[in-house]
Amino acid sequence: MTDDLVVDLQGRDLTTLDAFWDAVAEPCGLPAWFGRNLDAWWDTVESRGVSPVIDVHDVLVVRVIRSDVSGLFAPGNADGERLARLFAEATRARLELC
């Protein structure tokens, strides 16, 4: 059994990467100097050493609602697709699209 950090963003208005960073900043304990880009996110979730909140957990699980019409994870949203690929490649983080 792993010690997962679950960040449930269902019901949040996630239309952009900036909205995603805003939503995960507090529950993930992201520092003010966090880069708010995919390279910084990779370092945070995979390499670790950025967030003491994430670092004490085996796996970070982020739950979001998949939108069929609009939103960050809607089909064809390039930013959402890149973020989802990053999660898919990570060994210590997982994206759950509900």
Image (spheres, grey):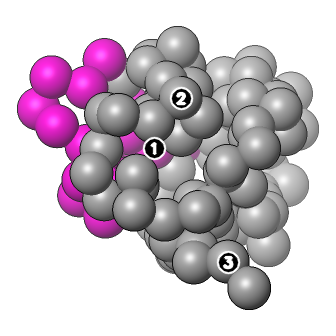
Q: Which residue occupies 47% across, 58% down?
A: 13
> What amino acid is at disc 3?
Thr
> What amino acid is at disc 2?
Ser
Q: Position of residue 61 (x, y in %)?
A: 63, 64
Position of 54 relative to 72 (above/below): below
Q: Secondary structure at mark 2?
A: helix
Q: Quadrant of residue 66?
A: bottom right
Q: Secondary structure at mark 3?
A: loop
Q: Earlier in the sequence, mark 3 or mark 1?
A: 3
Q: Quadrant of residue 91?
A: top right
Looking at the figure, which quarter contains the N terminus?
bottom right
Looking at the figure, which quarter contains the C terminus?
bottom right
Viewer-proximal residue, 90 or 62? Answer: 90
Q: Is residue 34 magenta?
A: yes
Position of 17 relative to 39 (above/below): below
Viewer-proximal residue, 68 or 29? Answer: 29
Name the mark on residue 2. Answer: 3
Q: Is residue 80 visible?
A: yes
**What's drawn in magenta, residue-wise?**
15-35
- Left or right of residue 73, residue 68 in this image: right
* C-alpha gap between disc 1 and disc 2: 20 Å
Query: Which residue position is annotated with label 2?
Result: 47
Name the mark on residue 20. Answer: 1
